[in-house]
Image (cartoon, grey):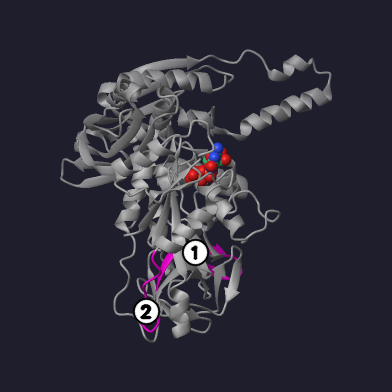
Amino acid sequence: MTDIRARQRKIRNFSIIAHIDHGKSTLADRILEYTGALTTREMQEQVLDQMDLERERGITIKLQAVALTYKADDGEEYLLNLIDTPGHVDFTYEVSRSLAACEGALLVVDAAQGIEAQTLANVYLALDNDLEILPVINKIDLPSADPERVKQEVEDVIGLDTSNAVLASAKAGIGIKEILEQVVLSVPAPQGDPEQPLKALIFDSHYDPYKGVIVYVRVIDGKIKSGSKIKMMATGKTFEVIEVGAFKPRMTIVDELNVGDVGFIVAGIRHVGDTQVGDTVTDAKNPTPEPLPGYRKINPMVYCGLYPIETSDYIDLREALEKLQLNDASLSFEPETSSALGFGFRCGFLGLLHMDVIQERIEREFNIPLITTAPSVIYHVTLTNGEVMKIDNPSNYPEVGRIDFVEEPYVKASIIVPNDYVGTIMELCQNKRGEYVNMEYLDTTRVTITYEIPLSEIVYDFFDQLKSSTKGYASLDYELSGYRQSNLAKMDIVLNGEQVDALSFIVHRDRAYNRGRIICEKLRELIPRQMFEVPIQASVGTKVVARETVKAMRKNVLAKCYGGDISRKRKLLEKQKEGKKRMKQVGNVEVPQEAFMAVLKNDE
Ligand SMILES: Nc1nc2c(ncn2[C@@H]2O[C@H](COP(=O)(O)OP(=O)(O)OP(=O)(O)O)[C@@H](O)[C@H]2O)c(=O)[nH]1
């Protein structure tokens, strides 16, 4: 026991939190390199971001853990468990998951940009979890860096003492040793009791086709080893442990996991539903009396329909979604049918980026070409008979005569921006039906502006507009603030006399006319000419608010080849086929994927 206690005193569990692009992944790489977890040659760029897609987009989505050994200046060897966190606003939930497994967090702030919206959001999460926060001012190598100003900002705005803040450059490898020394000195060792019954927090899991569900845990009390009988407290399921291991950074089998350890368990778990992230693992024979508090259940914010372009891909699409869900509990899906698109799935996501990532993974990893419909939020529709319907698909919107009132979700959006852009931001928020809450000065040059805005407006193109109207200087964070009554209506689109359910969307009545006009114009541009004229109409109820026409095609593409050159003909046909991949036959009109997203582009 004394060995275990001595070992426990030398464990440090920490995360890195930062606003997107402030250098979190680069710093993690440097730390891995410095502690020799990977040699430079072995080291792929940014190992913690394992998925290709993450690497391409340069963002972190899935959290990962890594166990490092570090010999500190005091001559002792420490075990540092670094748990990675995602940086994008869509994934705040996953940040809080990883933080619950830690005692400390490095707060990385860009020395040129200073505090941004997610810096604050992440600090609040870390404080909620009682973590020791160590500020790191990164990118001091940049000519525009002003570390002293940023330190002052961290003191003034967050109230953290920055006298020990490390000035670092993850890129140039400056300050890495100082950071590790700070972790050893300031992050508390895990507190648990090795003699108590096993109590471990599940902070993530993934599915392995051979081993079943692999559960990532942080041991709070007791220990776990192969042969142990364990029980998942929320589901009541019991299993026999086959293997336990650590992330070094490759998954490596170890004899046992003790208090404070971060590692994984293999226990022949076949069903992902048997292990919930946030659940407590305990000893089946000698269970702990109280489970850990766990996590707040996350609900998707944005829904869209995913339809295979080839009807025969439907079963494969379901399997792909099931597999993705194993690693991503925040993804939800259920079958739906559309008269325009056939059989598909209604899927729920944390936000637009999450939606994009899932869609791309299905197309890339599972090779299933998709049509996605425009994202929608959940509307609460109270009927005249008092019944409340939750509508995540505009095509299920009840008839106007049955509706008493409709409510839509609002978010509290905090935008950090240089003073010069205050007017621009206010105009943008007002355009998006936002209601001003307040404005606070961060320092003499920047402000935080808070607005209540309908989530549906944020989901559309708010973020892009925010970035483009402020030359990229604005940063945004938001959280759901509740439902409010709104004057909303369903807009239907009729193509060639046929209503296309997958193109319907919910709109504020004051904007119906404008939106209808814009979407009809967009559709006219996007829908290719057919052999016949295609009228496009937008209507609210029985009232047509806008109309356009796609003119009939004049000549066959092949006519250009004069019947002669076969290879050229084939090339042309192939080109057409390429284009067709993303087309869906709706009635007798070919509609491209972009048309289903046209509603997102509303440059009013
Ligand atoms: N000049 C300079 N650039 C840096 C430094 N650290 C990181 N960068 C660059 O900043 C960009 C963002 O760095 P990342 O490490 O990917 O940022 P991140 O915070 O992990 O971003 P997410 O993973 O999306 O949350 C990259 O282009 C890095 O090369 C630094 O110390 N100096």
List x then y, in percent, for residue 518.
40, 19
Q: Is residue 138 above or below residue 585?
A: below
Q: Is residue 142 above or below residue 192?
A: above
List x then y, in percent, for residue 338.
44, 40
Residue indicated by mark 2: 193
Q: Which residues are magenta?
A: 188-213
- Judge the density around disc 1: few (<14), some (14-19), many (≥20) Cα neighbours within 10 Å: many
In this view of the protein, which residue sits in the foreground, 36 or 580? 36
Closer to the N terminus: mark 1 or mark 2?
1
Q: Is residue 209 magenta?
A: yes
For the image shown, how many numbered marks are present on the structure?
Answer: 2
In this view of the protein, which residue sits in the foreground, 74 or 132? 74
In this view of the protein, which residue sits in the foreground, 18 or 239? 18
Residue indicated by mark 1: 81
Quarter occupied by the N terminus? bottom left
- In screen coordinates, is 268 left or right of 149? right
Residue plotted at (37% across, 36% down): 476
The three-letter amino acid code for the residue at tag 1 is Asn
Q: CA distance from mark 1 to mark 2?
A: 19 Å
List x then y, in percent, for residue 549.
47, 15
List x then y, in percent, for residue 229.
46, 83
Question: Does residue 85 appear anywhere in the picture?
Answer: yes
